[in-house]
Image: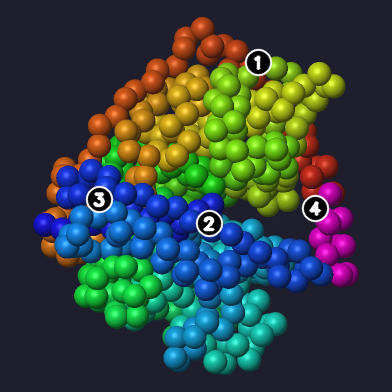
Amino acid sequence: MGYLVGLDIGSGSIRAGAFAANGKVIAIASRPMASVAPDPNRPDHIVWPANSVWQNSCDALREVVGALPDGALIGGVAVACLGMDGLPLDAQGNELYDIIAWTDARCMPYYERWSQDFGEDRQFLTTGTPARGFSTLFRLQWMADRHPEILDKTRKWVLIGDYLNYRLCGALAIDYSMAASTLMFDPATLAWHAGIAAFGGVDLDLMCDPWPAGTQLGEVTASAAEATGLPIGTPVVLGGHDYLCGVLPVGGFKPGPVVNVGGTWDVIQTTLPVLKIPKSAGGTGWTVEPHVAPGAFSAFGAAIGGLAVKWFRETIATDLANDDERFFALAFEAAAPNAGSVMFLPHLAGATGPIVDPNLAGAFVGLRAGHTRQDLLSAVYEGLNFQTRQILGSLEHLDVIPEKLIFVGGSSRNSALVQSKADALNIPVEVPEVAETTCLGAAMLAGVGTGQFGSVEDAWEAMRCPSTIVDPVSERIAEANDRFSVFEELFADLQGAHHRLSRSVRKKLASA
């Protein structure tokens, strides 16, 4: 049995991990996942440079492979990736355009037109996936309108994970969970939805063939081996949506557990034994899509999480932007339960559930001259916790009542934050000992795809990690409930102002 490698492409970083067959972490490496706005006249046009994504992935892989014992056998590699973002490749596999990032606003008019013409309810009930301003379908429509010459040369439109798999082994494929993020996939048939594609004017020949996660795609080529340090012939296995890989090591492929995957986005996930798309969940931000675990389906609600903390660090705590030790000390102190007058609405990318409104924005409310940046960061953490509480409350649409929350991701290492989350949500929070669960989940799929494990269940039994449980402090429950009610009032009261501001900004950009 060889070591297994997982690559996690997230909005904040690219992370590679090498693991033993028992789940022991051998090495973790991280590189930036940096977006850019190349046209100063269009600051709303934001991309991930494709070559940078590939190069940084190669550097991270080379570092973890270099940490393995000499002559170590690598049993397989798999990629977990954020959804929706992709790029066109020509017949020779050359990149024709950089990867349009989910933070890019250029496709909002297409989203609004789709919501009116096709309909939000129809979209959700047909595919389980609500339309979003950054959905893949709208990227293709924008490209057809603005750069038809590029689509004329395009052989395949690939999402980022598919692009990396292609660079590793030459195969063009997409797993079911990533296909679902495009708006054009039918979870009932596990195939592209020809009717939706036709309505949207998309040629489905541009999309890769969908396969189950855990399918072996090919082997690392000589050129990819030179770039990554992976041995020539290392099996490349199809991974999937990053949050779904992240829940595998904590049992998030079985019905029952509710998992909070903390990262740039805060994802709340639960597994459904059968496909169920309840009408009442429409318009609440919930997505129902195929799981990376065969035969299962996942329901998730997501909202901005770590991005709010990153924004705070880069704009308010600028002197700590490159000082991890001091910022983490500030973050630990600030993560304690907030009792101040200032509150924070964390909708830096709009509200994504259970009220879906892309025109909403973030806000500090209750600021006084005496407030410090620690007070503001404390309000940021509290706002994120209350946002999670809203999403958890809407689980009732799926007939799920969480008894505890399993919290994974780098922010789960902050014990003060974990305690504040338990207090704000008023439920126990379980924290696994391994923070890099997304890399580990991808590695598990690599083991399944190469036959090292007979199933995802077998991989979980072999590689699962222990955890601890943090209970809410009973004395804080009443105060948390009171502050949550204020949070929800502010959410509603500022909605009109945010809409007016959004219209003003978009009018200005449209005239640029």
Of badges 2 and 4, nearer the viewer stands 2
Image coordinates for residue 345, horizontal then vertical, percent: 69, 35
Label 2 close to label 4 by CB (< 8 Å): no
Label 4 close to label 1 by CB (< 8 Å): no
Q: Which mark is residue 19?
A: 3
Label 4 SS: helix
Taking the spot 43% from the left edge, 32% from the top edge, the residue there is 413
- Magenta-highlighted residues: 501-512
How much space separates mark 3 and mark 1, taking CA atoms? Answer: 42 Å
Judge whether 193 appears above or below 388 on screen. below
Give whichever of 167, 133 is nearer the camera.
167
The answer to which image quadrant residue 97 occupies is bottom right
The residue type indicated by label 1 comes to: Ala
Q: Which mark is residue 339?
A: 1
Return the disc, 3 or 2, that comes first in the chain's sequence.
3
Task: Locate residue 345 relative to residue 79 in the image: left or right.
Answer: right
